[in-house]
Image (cartoon, rainbow, N blue to C red):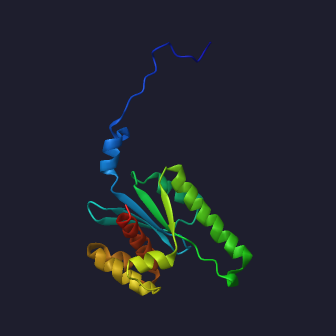
Amino acid sequence: PSGTLPAGSVRRVTLPQDNPARRAHIMTHFIGVDPGKKGAIALLDSEAMVVTVWDMPDTTAVLHDCVAALPVVKSAMLEKPFYPQMIGVTNATKIAMAYGILIGAFAWRDVPVTEVPPKKWKAAMDLSSSKSASREKAALMFPDQSDLFKRAKDDGRAEAVLLAVYAMGRR
């Protein structure tokens, strides 16, 4: 039949990045995500101890472009959303949909995702609920990149970075 290949013409080729031992060695990247509308996605290279931060993309297409560009990642730590009763069903639905899109994007790239409540990871990092404390801690941990956290509205960036550090500590 047309479209078939001759016997023996197909063989599996193992590329260097497919080697499990090599994958384990290069998997030094961790992701932290503050999933809010003003949140961020942080990529931590644990060998170089540098971070790359993206403000939360405002469309699914931009989110998928961001996730597609990621290197091999060991794990992603996502802050679980909080749904106070006062926000209403419509807003809770929007938050849940955006969160599901994030989880789906990481699943598409085979990135293991762990969800963590804010109180749990912040307690482990000796933080309060203060957004400025998160910015200060991130700036102290990454002094060469402290400009990422200098504005009050950069708390989502700081918390995403701290979530990536938390993920690294849990490996």
Q: Is residue 95 left or right of residue 11?
A: right
Quadrant position of the C terminus in the picture: bottom left
Q: In the orientation shown, which residue stands out farthest toward the right?
A: 89
Quadrant position of the N terminus in the picture: top right
Answer yes or no: is residue 50 visible. Answer: yes
| Residue 154 coordinates in the image, percent (x, y) | 44, 79
Residue 48 or 126: which is nearer the viewer? 126
Residue found at x 30% / y 75%: 141
Residue found at x 50% / y 13%: 6
57, above or below 144, in the image? above
Q: Is residue 81 left or right of residue 46?
A: right
Residue found at x 36% / y 42%: 20
Q: Is residue 123 left or right of residue 94?
A: left
Residue 155 or 118: which is nearer the viewer? 118
Q: How many marks?
A: 0
Residue 153 or 104: which is nearer the viewer? 104
Residue found at x 73% / y 74%: 90
Answer yes or no: is residue 150 visible. Answer: no
| Residue 147 coordinates in the image, percent (x, y) | 33, 77
5, above or below 87, in the image? above
| Residue 13 coordinates in the image, percent (x, y) | 39, 28
| Residue 50 coordinates in the image, percent (x, y) | 30, 65
